[in-house]
Amino acid sequence: MTYTIIDRNRLSEDHFIPYASQWLEADDIQAVVDVLESSWITQGPKVSEFESKVAEHCGARYAVAVATGTAALHCAAFAAGVEPGDEVITSPITFVASANCVAYLGARPIFADIDPDTLNCDPNEIEKNISPRTKAIIPVDFSGHPAEMDEIMSISQEHGLTVISDAAHSLGAEYRGKTVGAIADMTVLSFHPVKHITTGEGGMIITDNPDLYERLLLFRTHGITNRLEMLSNKKSGGWYYEMQALGYNYRITDIQCALGISQLAKLDRFVSRRREIAHHYDQAFSGIPEVILPVERPYVKSSYHLYVLQFDFRLLSTDRTELFDKLRARNLGVHVHYIPAHLQPYYKNKFGYQYGDYPHAERYYDRCLTIPLYPRMTDMDVQRVIDSICEEIDSARL
């Protein structure tokens, strides 16, 4: 059987260009078909193979694959021992799952304002928010740029806190020569289609700590274990199992993991193309006074999950909504990442957050626009994005 892969070079010149998209090739599809034709389609050998390959790539001892990136965050927060009454510090500029995983466990998410350059949590703001109730820190590698992990790990060690790196945006990135996944107590990955590699939906937690690893395995499967060394009754038969915690069914399938294994082999190529496109954007938009480019620290290799421009709308006759609508009318799938989590109605109503609490995050939000970047973009796609944005800026320049 053969499979048709869309040739993007044959698409019309004005086709829709999303802000992100998966790149599936014939061998990816064949890997899934092979599993569908095998004896296993869920919780079989491909799950452990995928875990081993990702752990090896990241330089870690253990990996636990789960159903989604959100599930991975939830598992990690549980493994860290987060309980009602605890506080966990994270970024307001993130998808809400980074904070929700804390609320799921009855604890309180505490936000730390961002560094205006990297858009990641400012370590000084993290330290200012530590209290006797703080249990963990969840720094977010926004857009693929790793957080300031040396400072964050030092803060965590001083205060006895667990660090859960939300690296959903940064698979394939490096921080001071270290691969993302080899630094924090636990590192969380996402394999959603907009990310660097995809399993459809899926996530993973990476750790070097055997105790955390055991808790992650437990939580992934209803809180149930049949591992002899963990059982309270070690004299029962081979049928025996125990539910030792209130876990969830967060299991992933062999179907998904087969796709993940195939995709992982292409990660370096995908990240290289993302960085190449980001370089083109940097060159095209540098020197334009109305535009603020994303920052990449010299000791970081960003994997550019997102490319976010900020606009100084004081210099333009348009606002963000109008610019967004005009670029969408040009069939460019621009987006906004993210509405600050503390401004979501749930967090305002539940925890009392309000506008003005985190000025750097709010200022960023008022000015940001995510533009298309994904490895399957053609050079023609990239140039169309550049030309469209420059034309809109020129027409709105005061």
Image (cartoon, rainbow, N blue to C red):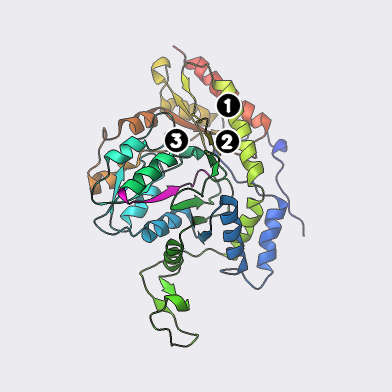
Residue 314 falls in image quadrant: top left
| Residue 169 counted in the magenta span | yes
Of 226 and 279, nearer the camera is 226
The N terminus lies in quadrant: bottom right
Is residue 232 among what the camera can see? yes
Alpha-carbon neighbours of circle 1 within 10 Å: few (<14), some, or many (≥20)? Answer: many
Which residue is depicted at the point 53% across and 63% down? 252
Q: Residue furthest top?
A: 398
Mark 1 — residue?
281
Of 185 and 270, nearer the camera is 185
Q: Position of residue 300 (x, y in %)?
A: 52, 35
Secondary structure beneath label 1: helix
Is residue 112 among what the camera can see? no
> Which numbered disc, 2 or 1, marks the residue that appears first in the sequence?
1
- Under mark 1, the amino acid is Tyr
Secondary structure beneath label 3: loop
Q: Are marks 2 and 1 in contact (CB under 8 Å)?
A: yes
> Which numbered disc, 1 or 3, marks the residue that appears first in the sequence?
1
> Which numbered disc, 2 or 3, marks the residue that appears first in the sequence?
3
- Under mark 3, the amino acid is Val
CA gap between label 1 and label 3 equals 17 Å
Secondary structure beneath label 2: loop
Mark 2 — residue?
373
- Under mark 2, the amino acid is Leu
CA gap between label 2 and label 1 equals 10 Å
Answer with left or right where residue 92 lies relative to residue 62: left
The residue segment tinted magenta is 159-170
CA gap between label 2 and label 3 equals 13 Å
Which residue is depicted at the point 61% across and 57% down? 53
Residue 48 falls in image quadrant: bottom right
